[in-house]
Amino acid sequence: MSEDKYRAALDAAAMQLSCRALSTKMLRGKLLAKGHDEEAADYAIAWLTERSLLSDGQFAESVVRSYARRGYGAARIRQELSRRGISREDADAAMELFSPVLPQMLSLLEKRLHGDLSDRKEVDKAVAALQRRGFSWSDIKNALEEYGASLDIDE
């Protein structure tokens, strides 16, 4: 009987992972929510991890690539990694892949400003939008300079 609970948890975990990649924390939460006990969930996670079928490091790298491709900055990506239960070590390793994507930042500036840098309020709104997406001030400043902004914004 006890072997059945382990097999059931492992089957449920494999089914979850066949639909989409998950972090260890996310998978554990899903297994517990489906009624599997902690021991069976831990067994399934250990079994999958030993066989490299579940890896927080690989999952973190895919999250970084995905969010960077969608135009998010480092702070927002780190926040997302934390929300998904990725350890600081795995997050740091995955973030080594990240570099801000200037063309996406420039595209957002163009969408917001339409080439008009004279309206300080609109420039401030564009800067705020980039900050919400997780870009650092130095990245935003570089993007503004690249965009052609000659602003004297105090840091």
Image (tube, rainbow, N blue to C red):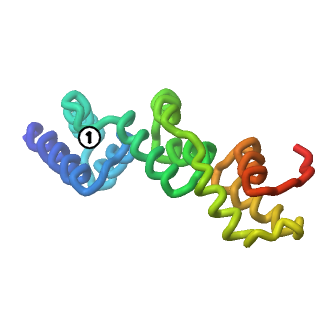
Using residue 53 as the reference point, say whether residue 4 is left or right of it: left
- What percent of the width, then of the height, locates residue 10? 17, 43
Using residue 85 as the reference point, say whether residue 24 is left or right of it: left
Compared to residue 108, the image places residue 138 above or below, namely above
Residue appearing at x 48%, y 53% in the figure: 69
Residue appearing at x 44%, y 51% in the figure: 66
Quadrant of the snapshot with the N terminus:
top left
In depth, the one of 37 and 119 nearer the eye is 119
- What percent of the width, then of the height, locates residue 90? 45, 31
Q: Residues within 10 Å of mark 1 (few under 14, many from 20)?
A: many
Which quarter of the picture shows residue 49?
A: top left
In depth, the one of 29 and 62 nearer the eye is 62
The amino acid pointed to by label 1 is Ala
Quadrant of the snapshot with the C terminus:
top right
Compared to residue 117, the image places residue 42 above or below, namely above
In depth, the one of 107 and 21 nearer the eye is 107
Compared to residue 84, the image places residue 114 above or below, namely below
Residue appearing at x 75%, y 63% in the figure: 126
Using residue 83 as the reference point, say whether residue 136 is left or right of it: right
Using residue 95 as the reference point, say whether residue 52 is left or right of it: left
- What percent of the width, then of the height, locates residue 51? 19, 31
Q: What SS does tag 1 mark?
A: helix
Residue appearing at x 22%, y 28% in the figure: 50
- What percent of the width, then of the height, locates residue 150? 87, 54
Q: Which residue is mark 1?
A: 41
User: Could you tell me how many numbered marks the image carries?
Assistant: 1
